[in-house]
Image (cartoon, rainbow, N blue to C red):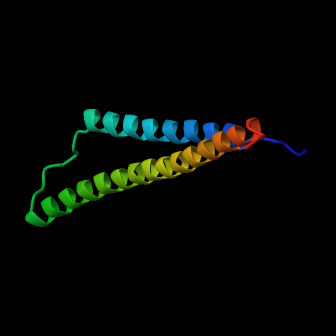
Amino acid sequence: VKVNISPLHLGLLLLVIGVLLIVFGAYLAYNTYVSYTPILPRALSLEEAVTNTAYELVNVAVKLGFLGVLVWCGSIITKHGVSLVVEGYRVNKVSKCPGQ
């Protein structure tokens, strides 16, 4: 089954998907920020305190990394969506003006 989708419609679809990914990433980041409570159990020694703190920092860094990748992918999809929308408008403009 072959589906004919114009660059304009595909661009709009990619634009919506990209913006939704960016908004979803921002929502997740805000939700994590609001509900964040560090889990630092009482340490009996300096080594345990450093280990617990390092674990918590790595946990936060991994979450930020995943959110960063999500927003990065959303921005790439949005960029390609905008390019396709611009191309679709150019194609429509050229096809409507046959005398030029």
Q: Is residue 61 shown left or right of residue 14? A: left
Is 7 located above or below residue 57 in the figure?
above
| Percent of width and height locating residue 91 | 70, 44
Which residue is rendered at x = 65% and y = 43% of the image? 90
45 or 58, nearer to the observer: 58
Q: Is residue 36 visible?
A: yes
Q: Residue furthest bottom?
A: 47
Quadrant of the snapshot with the N terminus: top right
Q: Is residue 17 shown left or right of residue 69? A: right
Q: Is residue 10 visible?
A: no
Which residue is rendered at x = 52% and y = 49% of the image? 79
| Percent of width and height locating residue 43 | 12, 55
Quadrant of the snapshot with the C terminus: top right
Which residue is rendered at x = 27% and y = 38% of the image? 33
95 or 82, nearer to the observer: 95
| Percent of width and height locating residue 80 | 57, 50
Q: How many marks?
A: 0
Q: Identify the image quadrant of residue 49.
A: bottom left
| Percent of width and height locating residue 45 | 9, 62
